[in-house]
Amino acid sequence: VSEQQRRIPGATVARLPEYLRILVQLAQRQHRTVSSGQLAELAGVNAAKVRKDLSHLGTYGTRGVGYDVDFLLFQMRVALGLTQDWPVLVVGAGNLGRALANYDGFAERGFPVVGLVDADPAKVGTWVGGFEVRSVDELAALAGGHESLIGVIATPAAAAQTVADQLVAAGVTAILNFAPVLVNVPDTVAVRKVDLALELQILSFYRRIHEDRALTAEARGLTSG
Amino acid sequence: VSEQQRRIPGATVARLPEYLRILVQLAQRQHRTVSSGQLAELAGVNAAKVRKDLSHLGTYGTRGVGYDVDFLLFQMRVALGLTQDWPVLVVGAGNLGRALANYDGFAERGFPVVGLVDADPAKVGTWVGGFEVRSVDELAALAGGHESLIGVIATPAAAAQTVADQLVAAGVTAILNFAPVLVNVPDTVAVRKVDLALELQILSFYRRIHEDRALTAEARGLTSG
DNA sequence: GACTGTGAAGTAGTTCACAGCT
DNA sequence: AGCTGTGAACTACTTCACAGTC
């Protein structure tokens, strides 16, 4: 992987996993090649964007034909760092943490959950699906056994920073934060935040715009004829 | 709300809920005013961006002082369409759907869950936290009782499109989709997608960049002194 | 004929820098 | 003195349009 190939624009990085998901599906259906137009259709974007995005991985297409599905799959996994599985440790055994620990979608896509910890002694030792809840004090020990582990914060907001500090101290270099608060970590650690209520709030904003379209269409008589 | 104020850039809309969360906190701590610099610090962005973002809501700051927390809170809720609660109906009573139905963070922030439905007859009638799982056939009846309801799709990918069609048929105009697949809806319906494994994949990409920083710092002797 | 790869043009988003108000 | 609001400069991203290849 050359220097050139690493400087992939953030907007492209955010779309690559979507292409990856589609390519996996296509491979399962025995498709050998795919064109930028087909990929664009399936990903809900336009074809020029797909080509530009894929060009950042290197130029792997064949003019007149398209892209080789298997080869593109491989290159995309290399680009995203997904040639290996990433073990995941979930911190917080509330509703969300328990669901994430047992969410099949993670393991299926290369992220096996290896443990579930909580600070509440009443929860420690209980079983949640396939996992025994361990104490948060064992976090370092559980993380230590894995070379590259992703920490998932599924605690209340008030506990998130403490947990982040503990994960960093345990050598974790990638954190997915579901708590609705910004956590501070050294810039050698990658953090992403997912705030579920925030998504609903954004949806609330856009609903009005779409609603206006419906009303405009109705006024024009487009819905009834 | 004037025409002008409605054309808020998408990038700004995506940040408004984060400001909103911070403002709620500040109001709880009895802060009367807040400056763009303080908001920026708490939101992890820069001050110019905060001022530009807030200017899209109208010009509500006072030079030399900052913004009135309560007034800004109100204006932001108006802008996002959050002056009312939004009832939520969760479709899919798997791990994720059950967790979402019982996730306190939704109700706390104005999105009370009003029902949980599933297509599996074995699950219908069982209780999950405070909810009895109802049949997906009752979806329209459950949605019909609420004027503006948000549908949450927490089913496997294969069922997502069917569920989306049912939600649209029931008059739902806002959908949050957790299934890892693109759903097609009329353009009068707002959809947002959240793909949890996709977030981990993006994290996988960025971990390498942050890792490189750690190695560079080490090589320069910055980590050891 | 079909489809890629990419300069160039166009659009959106960010940051600067400072005039203007309190 | 402190802080907002905003043109202007800058940077990032998207889309067009077409030469180049199979």
Image (cartoon, coloured by chain):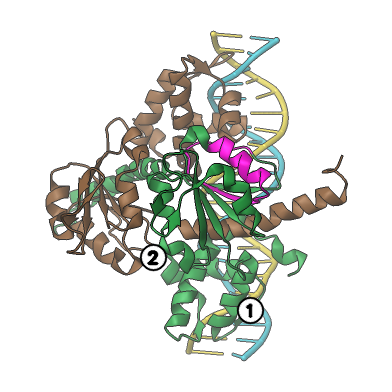
Chain colours: A green, B brown, C yellow, D cyan
Residue A161 drawn in magenta: yes
Indicate left or right for B127 with B39 as reference.
Answer: left
Q: Which residues are magenta?
A: A160-184
Question: In terms of secondary structure, where does tag 1 sit?
Answer: loop
Tell me, yes or no, if residue A56 can be seen here: no
Q: Quadrant of the N terminus of chain A?
A: bottom right
The answer for which chain carries disc 1 is A
* Callouts 1 and 2 close, C-beta under 8 Å: no
Q: To which quarter of the image does residue B183 belong? A: bottom left
Q: Which residue is mark 2?
A: B181
Q: Residues within 10 Å of mark 2 (few under 14, many from 20)?
A: many
Q: Residues within 10 Å of mark 1 (few under 14, many from 20)?
A: some
Image position, residue B198 (x, y; %): 50, 60
Residue at image point 45% right, 53% down: A132
In terms of depth relative to the viewer, which is nearer, A77 or A126? A126
Q: Which mark is residue A60?
A: 1
Image position, residue A13 (x, y; %): 58, 60
